[in-house]
Amino acid sequence: MPKFTYAAVNKAGKSITGAGESTSRDTMADTLIKQGLRPVTIKVASEKKGFSSKLKNFGNKVKLKDLVIFSRQMSTMISAGVPLTRALSTMQTQSTNKYFQTVIAGISHDVEGGMSLGEAFGKYPTVFSEIYINMIKAGEAGGILDDIMKRLATQVEQDSSMRKKVKGAMTYPIVILTVTVIAFFGITMFVLPKIGKIILDLGGPNAKLPIYTVAMLNISAFMQKKGVFIFVFLVIFVFFGMKYIKTPKGKYKFHYVLLKIPVLKDIIIKIAVARFARTFASLMTAGVTVLDALEVTGGAVGNKVIQKELIEAAKEVKNGKQLSEPLSKSKNFPPIVSQMLAIGEETGQTDTILVRVADFYEEEVATVIDSLASIIEPIMIIILGAGVGLIAASVMGPIASLSKNIGG
C-alpha cells in the first residue's frame, strides 16, 4: 500500500505534518478530514529499501498463535458490547509481541479517526491475510463482526495446522535435496579433478576407462570451467523468477503450472476446496449475500486460477443461476462439490453441507501429506545413495582395475 507524507491544519489553526498509508491521495485526504484536519499537501513518500531498512524490519512478524488469541478475545469483547476502540486498546496492552502492539495501536488510531476496521486492517497485509481483511469487511457490513472474528480464529488455527503438516512433510526432502546439490557441485569441482589426475597418471593417456567414469570426468571438467557461471545464472534466474511470480500475471501463470503437476495438483485443489467451502459457509451463516461471499472467498482459495473460476461463477450467479451450475463445469472443482452444493441449495442448508465438505477435504489433505511424507523420505535416500554409489563406482572401479594391471 502506498505511503504518503502530508501537511495539514488542525481545528486550532496549527500546522502539523505526518505520514501514513492509504490506497490513494483522495482516500488519504478523506482520512485526514475525518480526523478533524484540513489537508494542505499530500505527497507520495519515497521508500528506502536498502539493507538497513530490511534489517530494521527483520523479525517484525506476528505468529499465528498471536493472531488466534487476538481474534478470539476481540470476538468476546465485541459480543460483550465493549466499544471497538476500547477493545483494541485492551488487546494492545495484553499482547506480548512488541510489533503486534505497534500494529494494534496503528489500527486503533485509524479507527478513532473514522476509518473502518477492515480498511485499518488492510494497512498491514504482512500481518493480516487478504481473506482475513475481506471477512472483517463482510462482518462490518453485515453487523456480525463478533461472529466473524470467532470464525476467523478457528480458520487461522486450521490453516496453521495444515501449514505445519505441509512444512513437516517437505522439510526432510528439501534438506536432502539441498545437501545433494551442494555435494554434487563440491565433488565435481574440487574432488573429481584431483582423482581424475591420479587415474590418468596411473593408466597413462591411452588408458581405457569405463564410460561412466569418462562421463563423470567430463562433467567435472565442464563444471570447473562453467560452474561459477552456472551458479550465477541460477541465482539471477531465481531472483528475477521470484520477482515475476509476485506480479499478477506471473502469479497466475505460476499457479497454472502448479495445477499441471500430477501429485501437487491434487493437494492444491483439495486445500483450495476446503478453504472455499469453510469460508463460504462462514459467510453464508453470517448472512452475507452469495455474490459478496464469492468475492471474499475468491481471495481465500490461494490459487489465482481457481479464483478466476469463482469470479466467472459469480457472473453466472448474478444472471440468475445457482452456484452449483457453474461449479459443475469447473475444470478444478471436483464433481462432488457441485453435487453437495446443489443438495444444499435445494434443502436450504448450504452452509451446513459445505462445512462437511470442508471437513472431508481437510482430512483428505492431511492423509495425502502424511502418505507423501512416508514415501518421499525413502525415495530421497535411494536417490542420494544412487548418486553416491555412481560417484564411488566411477572413481574406485578404474583405480582398482589399474592397480591390478600395475601389480601384474
Image (cartoon, rainbow, N blue to C red):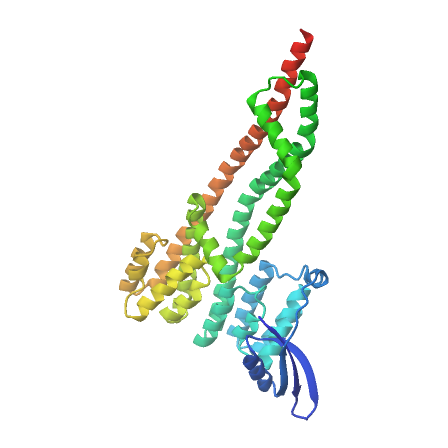
Q: Residue furthest bottom?
A: 12
What residue is shown at x 60% (from left), y 53% (from top)?
Answer: 239
User: Which quarter of the rendered picture does the C terminus lie within?
Assistant: top right
Residue 109: image x %, image y %?
A: 62, 78
Image quarter where the N terminus lies is bottom right
> Is 16 on the left-hand or right-hand side of 388?
right
The correct choice, above or below, for 54 with respect to 230 in the image is: below
Seen from the viewer's position, the closer of residues 14 and 282 is 14
Can I make out residue 229 in this image?
Answer: yes
Asked where in the image residue 45 lies, by quadrant, the reply is bottom right
Q: How many marks?
A: 0
Residue 191 appears left or right of 387: right
Q: Is residue 407 above or below residue 155?
A: above
Is residue 146 shown left or right of residue 400?
A: left
Residue nearer the viewer, 49 or 76: 49
**Which corner quadrant of the image does residue 224 belong to?**
top right
For this orientation, the residue located farthest to the top is 408
Q: Where 192 falls versus 328 (above or below)?
A: above
One can see residue 95 in this view: no
What residue is rendered at 55% in x and 48% in y? 167
* Image coordinates for residue 256, horizontal then vertical, percent: 43, 53
Q: Position of residue 78 (x, y in %)?
A: 53, 74
Q: Is residue 386 left or right of residue 17?
A: left
Tell me where residue 17 appears, x and y as whole percent.
Answer: 69, 82
